[in-house]
Amino acid sequence: VKVEADEGSETNAGEDKNGSKDDENSPDVSGYNAFLDLEPTGWYRSYVEFMLKNGYMNGMSANEFAPNGNVTRGQLVTILYRIAGSPDVSGTTNPFKDVEIGKWYTDAVIWAAANGIVNGVTADMYAPNNNITREQLATILYRYDGAKKSGINYLSKFADSQTVSAYAVDA
């Protein structure tokens, strides 16, 4: 799974809980083998199986997982929403014009916005189908984890640290 380099910005604001590994000769209880684009001995196998077994990810289609694909903004919040137990969002306002009711990501985006995990690319646009950028990913995961500041400037270690958007600096 790839995350795009930061070209766009976000305004400030796709049953084994123990992660046990199956080798390629084990019964496929996760559905891993249904995906024709997953290598039988790929380095990612145990991670993908964990996500599939727990229902956090479903793949791009019945037989495509896209392990080398990009992650969209809608996909990331859907994964986090499922990890959080897919909380009920009925009665919660959808703040984004481009997040249509009934899409696979709708409840996840509403939940993430209501919990301060995401903001839009503008005040009323979320861009769920846009590929997520590195700084958006870092910021969303930072907010999902409770936005705890470390007090350490990790950005200075990166050559592109001066290009990080203000909303993402703490992440």
Image (tube, rainbow, N blue to C red):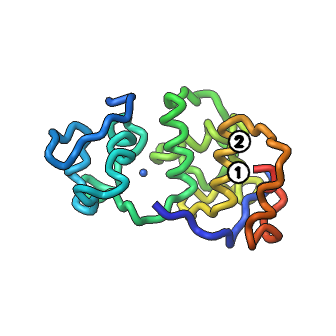
Label 2: few (<14), some (14–19) or many (≥20) C-alpha neighbours in 10 Å:
some
Is residue 2 positioned above or below 40 on the image? Answer: below
- Residue on which disc 2 sits: 143
Q: Relative to 93, is 155 on the left or the right?
A: right
Give residue 156's quadrant in the image: bottom right
Label 1: few (<14), some (14–19) or many (≥20) C-alpha neighbours in 10 Å:
many
Tell me the residue at 35%/56% (across/down). 43
Q: CA distance from mark 1 to mark 2?
A: 6 Å
Tell me the residue at 66%/48% (across/down). 140
- Residue 162 x/y as whole percent: 83, 70
Callout 2, which amino acid? Answer: Arg
Tell whether label 2 touches label 1 (CB within 8 Å): yes
SS for dot 1: helix
Which image quarter is the N terminus in?
bottom left
Tell me the residue at 62%/40% (across/down). 110
Callout 1, which amino acid? Answer: Thr
- Residue 64 x/y as whole percent: 29, 59
Q: Relative to 141, is 36 on the left or the right?
A: left
- Residue on which disc 1 sits: 139
